[in-house]
Image (cartoon, rainbow, N blue to C red):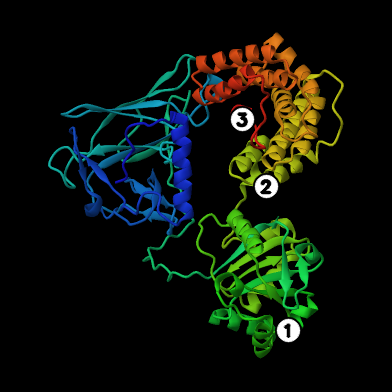
Amino acid sequence: MSQTPTGSGALTPSEEYLDAWGQLAQMIQEGRSFSGRERNCCFLNTRGPRFADVSAATGLDFADDARTVAVADWDHDGDLDLWLANRTSPRVRFLRNDVPSDSAHLTLELVGDPERGTNRDAIGARVEVYLGGPQPRTLVKSLVAGDGFLSQSSKQLHFGLGERETGGGENGVVAKIDRVVVRWPTNAEPNVETFTNVAANGRYRIVQGTGKADALAATPRTVALQPADLKPPPETSVARVKLTEPLPIEAFEYRDLDGRTNRSSEFVGAPVLINFWSTTCAPCMKELREFSTEKATLDRLKVRIVALNVDALNQSEPPTAAALKTALANLKYEFESGWANKELLDAVDKFQRRVVYRQRTLPLPMSVLIDPAGRGSAIYFGPVTPRVLLADILAMTANPATFRQQAVPFAGRWARDLFESHPIAVASAYLEGGYPTDARAYIDKFLANESAPPSIGRSRDEINRNLRVADMHHTIGRIAEFEAKPSDAVKAYRRAIDYHAEHAAARVSLAWLLATSSDDTVRNAADAIPLVEPMARGGWGDEIPVFDALAAAYAASGKFREAIAAAETALAAAENSNDGQRAAEIRVRLARYRADEPYRSPAAQPPSGR
């Protein structure tokens, strides 16, 4: 089984956690397993200090990349069945328990009363089942939520009452239930109820405050599940990836076979298929020939196909333009053609990495379908047939809901239709992942509904609205810094302050940028000091970045004595909070101030903590 790492290095626990997630993400991108392709394990409680490994004996040792297990009496026959969910195929397994048994059981469904202080699902309730007979015993279970990783087993509590007590078999005596005691999760009295009308091999619903257990009828299952053998398809590098929504592609250009430069900005107004091929690739040649067979239909739909040859990138003596023209003529290819270049391939690779998480070497042929608005609509790894291409082109006109539904192999519900994620959190996640364009697009989507100027009223709703919009503009400033656009960042930070004058993060970010930017047109120490000086005097905002920015602003204005004092305050705060990274950064800047030198940011992004 996978082992938990032991020991610790120089990283903090939070840094180790994030580093581990980064390594895990890289493993998935490389097509490796979460856990090294170990078989599933099942352990039997031996009622002692040890467990027995019964993985193979139970048949549960599947070679799946399993993630979670949920337990439920799915077929209502008194024993527990299993649902397994996997990262790999099959995504779901159902394991029905058909092992013969003489054991008795009891199933209880609890319903809490909110007026008595208990949640409706009775989460947190404790149930005690008292068994009589020659060997009295008590069984105890609590009702919990989220009882496993990525899973929730049935909220019906299942008690195994054991085998018949005398003789075994059909002539034995089923365990007698003396009483069931429920301790409801509430401080209101009474919070304990006792139920005596409960029998073995029964299913009951217990409603708080009723004093009785009602028989619960078995619910018929409407889903028919048939056992089947897993037959994995043969591995192939050919795949059609249809996006759930079109995404922008970075601008690119290429030379056609006549030496003219063409730009992606010219692709607006009609569907375009960018196809990469090689003269040494037989599937490439076959694909280009097939495009020609549907030329009349493609022309009718005003589709442009641009076949870009990659031989100049990987051959020491690539074919000449004349040789390529001859090869294409022999294929009866009559669409556009040209040479691929590294910058273009980098743009396409960056685009497909946003769509496909698992990364492999790009195959030949490969194509990207661009919609009339210049956005990527589909990616084809390997050949694409004219029939599939035409279907995807016709689907471009579908409404967004239909378009995204066509991108998945089966129907379902979309989470975005059920709730809206916090825009700042989502944009920050995009930015941390290295996708500033996506981060900005997500924020712009929400700002489109917030075009009104800052409210001048002081109602709670107006203040909250101003703060929400200020947060979004501050995030746009962070994105602009990431993109090395300091002028845009300054505008965004100022806009955030317009909406919320006491927005601490925006004031500190703006002051830092004005004090330390290496861009002479941006740097303005005189404007930086008033942004953070009142914060330092008033004690609002995180002390470390406030005094760090104030020190940089003083130094940029030539006030090195004040800069040293502010930097020493920031350093002391960082050391007191055990923030070693920021403390080390501040020491470097403090040394410059003591040498009467201002600090200039070496990169577009602000230092830690801002």
At mark 2, the secondary structure is helix
Between marks 3 and 1 in the image, the one whose residue lies nearer the viewer? 3
Quadrant of the drawing holding the C terminus? top right
At mark 1, the secondary structure is loop
Taking depth in this image into account, of 374 and 181 the one nearest to the observer is 374
Q: In this view, does 279 lie to the left or right of 226?
A: right
Residue picked out by circle 3: 607
Precedes in sequence: disc 1 or disc 2: 1
Q: What residue type is labelled 1?
A: Glu
Q: Position of residue 588 (x, y in %)?
A: 57, 24
Q: Are the two marked residues, 1 and 2, in contact with CB atoms closer than 8 angstroms?
A: no
Tally the marks: 3
Between marks 1 and 2 in the image, the one whose residue lies nearer the viewer? 1
Precedes in sequence: disc 3 or disc 1: 1
Q: Which amino acid does label 3 sit on?
A: Pro
Q: Is residue 148 left or right of residue 365?
A: left
Q: Which mark is residue 385?
A: none
| 3D distance between C-alphas at marks 2 and 3 | 23 Å
Q: Which amino acid does label 2 sit on?
A: Asp
| 3D distance between C-alphas at marks 1 and 2 | 37 Å
Q: Position of residue 532 (x, y in %)?
A: 73, 18
Taking depth in this image into account, of 13 and 166 the one nearest to the observer is 13
Q: Which mark is residue 334?
A: 1
Mark 2: few/some/many CA within 10 Å (<14, 14-19, 20+): some
Q: In which quarter of the image is residue 526?
A: top right
Q: Are the two marked residues, 3 and 1, in contact with CB atoms closer than 8 angstroms?
A: no
Q: Which residue lies furthest to the left in this view?
A: 167
Q: Quadrant of residue 572?
A: top right
Q: Position of residue 418 (x, y in %)?
A: 64, 43
